[in-house]
Image: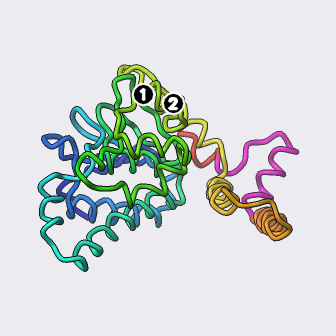
Amino acid sequence: MDYQFLQLEQHNQVATVWINRAELHNAFNTQVIEELHACFQALNTRDDIRVVILAGRGKSFSAGADLNWMKQAGQASQADNEADALKLAKMLQSLATLKQPTIARVHGIAFGGGMGLASACDICVASTDAKFATSEVRLGLAPSTISPYVIRAIGARQASRYFLTAERISAEQAQHIGLAHEVTSAEDLDNKIDEIVQALLLGGPEAQHASNQLIQMVNHQVLTEDLLQQTAQHIAHVRQGDEAKNGLNAFLNKQSPAWIMTTAE
């Protein structure tokens, strides 16, 4: 598929999705959202891709929603607004539920929806110059569609502050509140991401997907008998898979599992 505002690069088993609207700090409109959604859906069918990196061209990761697009949305009907917002919500969901591990490569600003994209990824690596914000309230709006992912990343208590104040969050503070996993210099950003990629490639792809599903299943649930049963059923299902059997046999026989042999380039 050809994209107007995205660039998709693949190096061995790693795909990098570049938002390419640098002149507008990678702000997104309906077309950018639709292209991202289509791209994530396509990547989700690819067994040759093990890791997905989301990045932005130019000076910023993403400034969030295009102001002109939001102005048009404000003049649209309730039904049209809901349909437009649902596109954004579904795009974020497709990113958050990708079967491959995802890494947000954040530099410059990640405001509004840009912070939502970073939060929807499994791992966020930021450069020291990165700045985050849920800036919606200063425009008379609310961070509705990004809220499940931001709250998952930083918790409800921190969200109370930053949703209501729209304060800018430094990279250091982002790491402190759990939004960024790693903060490094701009020069070392790609090296740090590559370290994490190499660690991810050592894991079984099916096991990683199952682990992400486990997190979604267990997160914020009360420890009940039903939850205990669900976790027991989950590991029983994983253990019966070919990948688990191969991984355990390889470990016991001091060999490399099959996925290492296929990923070592």
Image mark count:
2
Question: Which residue does the image show at 33% across and 63% down from the upper left?
Answer: 88
Q: Nearer the viewer, residue 196 or 257?
A: 196
Question: Which residue does the image show at 39% across and 50% down from the upper left?
Answer: 116
Residue type indicated by callout 2: Gln
Indicate the position of residue 67 as horizontal and vertical percent values.
16, 52
Q: Does residue 216 lie above or below 118 as drawn?
A: below
Q: Does the magenta stretch include residue 249?
A: yes
Report the quarter where the N terminus lies: bottom left
Indicate the position of residue 200 as horizontal and vertical percent values.
59, 42
Q: Which of 236 and 108 is in front in this view?
A: 108
Residue 170 found in image quarter: top left
Residue 48 falls left or right of residue 231: left
Q: Does the magenta stretch include residue 210?
A: no
**Disc 2 from disc 1: Cα separation:** 6 Å
Q: Is the magenta stretch mostly helix, strand or loop?
A: helix
Kindly identify which numbered label has been placed on residue 194. Answer: none
Q: Does residue 239 lie above or below 7 as drawn?
A: below
Q: How crowded is mark 1: few (under 14 residues within 10 Å), some or many (20 or more)?
A: many
Label 1 SS = helix
Residue type indicated by callout 1: Ala
Residue 184 found in image quarter: top left
Labels 2 and 1 touching (C-beta < 8 A): yes
How does the figure colour the protein chain or chains?
rainbow
Residue at the disc numbered 1: 171
In the current view of this chain or complex, which residue is farthest to the bottom? 79
Question: Which residue does the image show at 18% across and 77% down from the upper left?
Answer: 77
Kindly identify which numbered label has been placed on residue 175. Answer: 2
Q: Which of 3 and 28 is in front in this view?
A: 28
Residue 181 falls left or right of residue 81: right
Indicate the position of residue 211 as horizontal and vertical percent values.
67, 55
Residue range in magenta is: 242-259
